Image (spheres, rainbow, N blue to C red):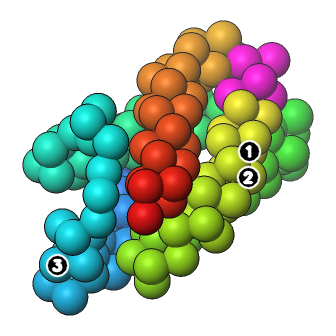
Amino acid sequence: MALYENSVFHIIVACIIPNIGGFVGSIFTSTDSSSWYVTLDKPNFTPPSWVFIPAWTILYLLMGYSSYRIWRIGNGCKGEAKIPLLIYVFQLILNWLWTPIFFAQALGWSFVEMIVLAIAVVATTALFFKIDKVAGIILIPYIAWISFAATLNYSIWYLN
């Protein structure tokens, strides 16, 4: 069996793709922007900074595996998975854009972007669920985290 036909290879690629964007986004949390973030007033429910990297890594892995299942079960981009995968890519791009917007000190715009992202994540989850219940269920923690992140983003914007 050729490497490109190997489902384990496809799972790995699907899981790496979201993490690449997350890694690139971390560039925007440079020392200068991190020192700005430290000065912000934050709500008392703000998690410690170290929580974000493992949380996002796990969520990106779940997103990747979920997208793999949809791609595989929904016959790739030619089958019923086409629209759900397009919405998935759209929400993934929105996800990656949030960090540079927020750390450009655009708190209001980052909240607006987060709301659009949350809608796209819910749409992705619903569309994935129609094709594969497991793929939809896998994204529920992502919905929960995005809801929390939107609340946190709004609170930081409000306090500053």
Q: Which amino acid type is shown beneath numbered disc 2? A: Val
**SS class, disc 3:** helix
Which residue is label 1 attached to? 120
Residue 22: image location, x then y, percent: 37, 63
Precedes in sequence: disc 2 or disc 3? 3
State the residue at coordinates (80%, 18%): 130
In terms of secondary structure, what is the magenta stretch mainly? helix
Residue 160: image location, x then y, percent: 43, 64
Magenta-tinted stretch: 125-130
Which residue is label 2 attached to? 116
Residue 94 is left or right of residue 75, and the answer is: left
Q: Where on the picture, by quarter, is residue 150?
A: top right
| Residue 157 part of the magenta-drawn span | no
**SS class, disc 2:** helix
Which residue is label 3 attached to? 35
Q: Which amino acid type is shown beneath numbered disc 1? A: Ala
Alpha carbons under labels 1 and 3: distance apart:
31 Å
